[in-house]
Image (cartoon, helix red, strand yellow):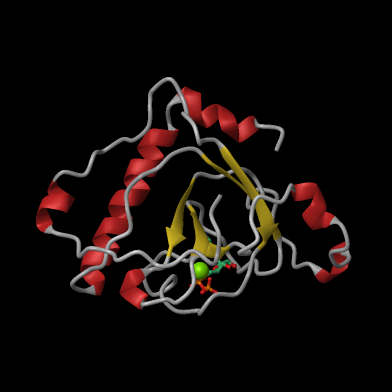
Amino acid sequence: TSSAHQTQPPASLQAPSDRATRPSIVGEDSGPTPPFPIYLAGTVQRGFGRGGKDLGCPTANLPSKLLQPAVDEHKGSGSAAEQPSLSPIDTRVHPMVMSLGWNPFYANKTKTAEVHIMHPFKRDFYGLQIQVIVLGYIRPEYNYVDVEALKNDIETDKQVANRSLERATYSSFASDSF
Ligand code: ADP
Ligand code: MG
């Protein structure tokens, strides 16, 4: 039900108490609970080209028109020869963290869905098809006093995601037919 036209909510500044009380794992041990799992597919878009890589956290930006079955996105897209190729290891299923929101620290005017894949890619993959399964919710979007505070929070997000996804009830989605 998310829409690119939703209005931007105010984001609170992250307080030290927010950081101290962050859980180290999220979601039920028994597996994702509604609205999860959420299946998303689309081609990787160019964003503002700032933020992601400076933060040590590049994010593959998804199209604002989400929730399209992967098969629809393939139709009418360019020939395979136009697509840059990635290695078979790169195109496996990898754990990810997704940001859905307005990136208040960067004062964006539009809502974006951006995926950081926890795998070292040797090259960019703009324009390639990406499929994502969202399995849980980590935290609300905050603003930050400085870039270091933002980077610290993103590092914690990655640890929380990895720890949460290690559970068999979540890692099993790596072999989902999607
Ligand atoms: P943009 O604003 O264009 O999204 P980023 O700094 O967020 O710029 O970089 C995003 C791009 O980096 C992705 O579109 C992708 O091609 C590339 N990339 C390289 N490694 C990763 C990764 N581990 N996760 C996500 N994107 C990656
Ligand atoms: Mg990005």
The residue sitting at 59% across, 34% down in the picture is 174
Q: Position of residue 57 (x, y in %)?
A: 42, 64
Residue placed farthest to the left in the image? 17
The residue sitting at 52% across, 60% down in the picture is 113
Q: Is residue 170 above or below residue 96?
A: above
Q: Position of residue 15 (x, y in %)?
A: 13, 59
Q: Quadrant of residue 5?
A: bottom right
Left or right relative to 114: residue 24 = left
Question: Does residue 151 appear anywhere in the picture?
Answer: yes
Q: Position of residue 58 (x, y in %)?
A: 47, 66
Q: Is residue 31 above or below residue 177?
A: above
The residue sitting at 82% across, 56% down in the picture is 74
Q: Is residue 82 above or below residue 65?
A: below
Between residue 121 and residue 63, name the one nearer to us.
63
Q: Quadrant of residue 29?
A: top left
Question: Does residue 130 appear anywhere in the picture?
Answer: no
Left or right relative to 96: residue 150 = left
The residue sitting at 42% across, 76% down in the picture is 108
Which quadrant holds the C terminus? Answer: top right
Q: Position of residue 77 (x, y in %)?
A: 84, 64
Total count of labels: 0
Q: Quadrant of residue 147?
A: bottom left
Between residue 117 and residue 100, name the one nearer to us.
100
